[in-house]
Amino acid sequence: MDTLAHPNAYARASETAQHVLSKLPDTLQKPKVAIVCGSGLGGLADTIEAGPKVELPYETIPNFPQSTVQGHAGKFIFGVIGEQKMPVALLVGRAHFYEGHTMDLVTFATRVCKVLGVETIIVTNAAGGLNENYRVGDIVCLNDHLNLAGFVGIHPLRGPNIEEFGVRFPPMSDAYDLDLRRRVHKAWVKLGLDQQKRRIHEGVYAFLAGPSYETRAECRMLRMLGADVVGMSTVPEIVVARHAGIRVLAFSLVTNMAVLEPGARGNDSIIQAMNKSELDQYLGKGKANHEEVLEAGREAAKDMQALVKQILSDLHED
C-alpha cells in the first residue's frame, strides 16, 4: 500500500477548507481549537452550546475520507463552547489506517484544521491499559508516544516534504504541550473530579496499525518499552499537527485492560480436566472487544466533556 504523502496535500486541504468555510456563518469561521472525538467519545459534541451550529457529514466534504467504524459518526461540527462562546471545530469520528486509508488520508482532517486557522488540537481515543496501576474508566493525559508503525515506514510525513505545512525534520520531543497538560491537572481539581472514583494519569501511548488487538506477548513487550496505553490512532494526527505547528493535547480513555500474563501451556496440570468450553473461557479471560470500548466511552463522556470545556474556558480567559 502506498503510504507516501500526497504531493498536492496543501492544495487539497485548501480546497476542502474553502468548501467548509462556504457553509459557515461569520461567527464560526475562525475556530482556534479542534477536538477529535475517538471511539465512543462522540458525546463530546454535546459540549457545543446553544447558538450557531453547523454539522457537515464527511461524505459531503470534498477530499474527506469516510470512517467505517462503529462509534465514529463521521461529521465535522462547528459551534461555540463556554460562556465566552469560543468557536471550535469537532471531528466526530476519524479515519484509521487499518480501514485501508493511506496515511495521507488518515491525517488529512488535521491539515484541513491547520488551513482553517486552528492553533490547538485536542485529540481523544479509546485505548487498552498496559499500566497495571490503571483501571477501566481512567483518563490518561498523554505526555509521549511510541510510533511503532512509524518505525517500519508507515509514517504520515514519508515522501516529499510539504513546505507550506512545516519543516522536513520536525522534532517530537516537545509534541505534548506542557502548559496544556498543566491546565488539565488544575481543571481536574477545579471541577472536583479528584473526589470521585475515576482517576487521571499521565502516560505514554503506543500506536500500532491494527485492526487486531494485541497478543499477550506484544502487550508485555510494549509495557517493557515504557508504554502505558495502546491503540490504533492518534499518533499520526499528532505528528502531522506538530509538523504544522499546532499545539497538542491528547487523552486516552482506558476502555479495557490488556492481558499481560502468559497464556496457559497445553501441558499445565490445571487445564487437563477441562472441557472445550471451559478451556475457551479460561484462555479468553480479559479478552478485548469493541462493545466494551464503546460502553466505557459512554460512561466517561460527562467527565471528559466537563474537563475539555473547563480547559477551553481557561484558555480563552488568558
Image: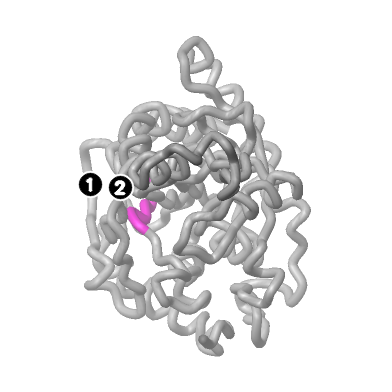
Q: Indicate whether 19 appears above or below 278.
A: below
Of residues 296 and 278, the one nearer the viewer is 278
Q: Indicate whether 288 appears above or below 234.
A: above
First in sequence: mark 2 vs mark 1: 1
Q: Which quadrant holds residue 292?
A: top left
| Element carrying mark 2 | strand
Image quadrant occupied by the C terminus: top right
* Amino acid at circle 1: Pro
Instruction: Tell me if residue 148 is in the magenta stretch.
Output: no
To which residue does mark 2 refer?
A: 79
Q: Where is residue 12 in the image (x, y as percent from the top left)?
A: 43, 82
Of residues 204 and 170, the one nearer the viewer is 204
Tell me the tag on residue 7.
Answer: none
Contact check, label 2 and label 1, Cβ < 8 Å: yes
| Element carrying mark 1 | loop
The residue at the point 52 percent across, 51 percent down is: 121
* Amino acid at circle 2: Gly
Q: Left or right of 92: which side holds 155?
A: right
In magenta, the rendered stretch is 87-93
To which residue does mark 1 refer?
A: 52
Q: Which quadrant holds residue 54?
A: bottom left
**What predominant SS class does the magenta segment belong to?**
strand
Q: Position of residue 268 (x, y in %)?
A: 59, 41
Residue placed farthest to the top in the image? 195
Q: Left or right of 316: which side holds 240?
A: right
Crowdedness near tag 1: few (<14), some (14–19) or many (≥20) residues, C-alpha within 10 Å: some
